[in-house]
Image (spheres, helix red, strand yellow):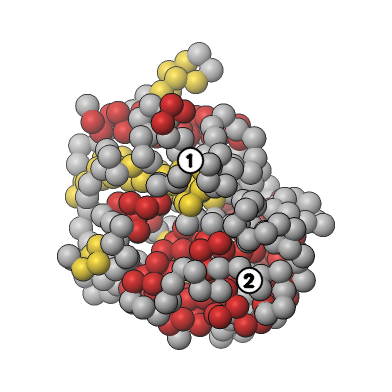
Amino acid sequence: MQAGTSRTISEARETLGQPANLYELEQGVQTRTFRHMDQLYPTRPVPRGSQVYPLQVAEAIAPTYEADGQTHDADAFMRRNDVTGLLVLKGDQIVLEKYAQGNDEHTRWTSFSVAKSLSATLIAAALHEGAIASLQDMVVKYVPELAGSGYDGVTVEQVLNMCSGVRWDETYRNPQSDRRAMFSAQLSLQRGSILQVLRNLPRLHAPGTVFNYSTGESFLQAEIVRAATGMSASDYLSQKIWQPMGMEQDAYWQLDANNGMEIASSGFCAVLRDYGRFGRFIANGGVINGQQVLPAGWVDGITQLPEGSVLRNVKPYAGPHALSYQHQWWLFPQGEHSIPGHGGAFSAVGVFGQYLYINREANVVAVLWGSAPAPEMPAYEKEIVAFLAAAVNAVAA
């Protein structure tokens, strides 16, 4: 429901999941829910502009990869990994686009934690225009409600890198976790309730010394953007990126309350090709029509982690690959541990199978929508990485 409306959700509940059950939905219900989140939660639109950035449809690639002793194509990959939307771009050319489970080119699908990378990009835009003076500014400068809390003395960059030292338990299906406490606060639709959850958390480590994946930390990005720019994250995204980049559809963003604050760590929803256009914006170094929107070198710096950084090899759940993290993006292994086909690549990743993959060396952007049966996906990760490498190789062939 759009911000400010009072429309009930009883009709939505007959066909979609209930808001409180988002992490435990049956798969068919889950898929319908993920493409209709505006019927369950308050949202704010992200308006598009009058011009559309053209993506040319090119000859389709036919990537294949090996798994479980067999060769699989894109359709099998989607079935095996509950992928509901797949887009591969080579530059501005669409070389693969597929939908499943009722989705199509008009579907606005939820991002989950892909939104973290998007809202961090708004921090970068505000830094470029001087609305944020420095990433070394204290968070409490922009979010004074956290003064005297564990976040007092934490910088904006430490929040971007999830190394504040403040306690956080990200377990999605543990009702006692901090992540579920944040979700319960969101469901209360009381502005400021999520900030209160964060304010009550103790600090366990010195800021900057330990990485700890925290959806709560990413929520602060919308608070920082509003304080710095005087605009909501949705409006700022529309002004700085969505309109000038030429997105083809309005997007929307879930809020913590009616007319409230964007859930900067989740809840962004857009059509598949517009996720791809956002990926092109990042791959192009944060430049639109020759204009620098992000600080020069910002995108280059995402993958530049020094040896010994606390952000190296920090993936929070089991899986076949050791990923690093910086500025709300997941980095593929580098150096001797690099994965063939993924040199210098990085991704925005959301639970249940959402990916925005950027490989600047290969000039490839890929988007995956997923409806996996559980939030964490270690069982799917190996095939996803293998398929993306196959797509990169097919583009280069």
Say which of 208 and 241 sits in front: 208
| Mark carried by residue 378 | none
Q: Percent x, y for residue 2?
A: 52, 78
Q: Is residue 281 shown to the viewer in this render?
A: no
* Residue 199 image-quadrant placement: bottom right
Q: Is residue 308 above or below residue 92?
A: above
Point 40% across, 47% down: residue: 304
Residue that mark 1 sits on:
307
Say which of 49 and 143 sits in front: 143
Q: CA distance from mark 1 to mark 2?
A: 25 Å
| Mark carried by residue 153 | 2
Q: Percent x, y for residue 370?
A: 52, 45
Give the class, few, some or many, for how many residues have Cα within 10 Å of label 2's Cα (few <14, many ≥20): some
* Residue 118 image-quadrant placement: bottom left
Q: Please tell me whether mark 2 sits on a helix, a strand or a loop.
A: loop
Point 46% across, 63% down: residue: 120
Q: Report the amino acid beneath label 2.
A: Gly
* Residue 36 image-quadrant placement: bottom right
Point 22% across, 27% down: residue: 397
Where, quadrant-wise, is the N terminus in this rendering?
Answer: bottom right
Please report whichever mark, 1 or 2, sits nearer to the chain's N-terminal start: 2
Q: Percent x, y for residue 330?
A: 49, 46
Say which of 115 and 150 sits in front: 150
Q: Report the amino acid beneath label 1.
A: Glu
Q: Percent x, y for residue 175?
A: 80, 56
Does 169 sit left or right of 135 as displayed?
right
Say which of 55 and 223 sits in front: 223
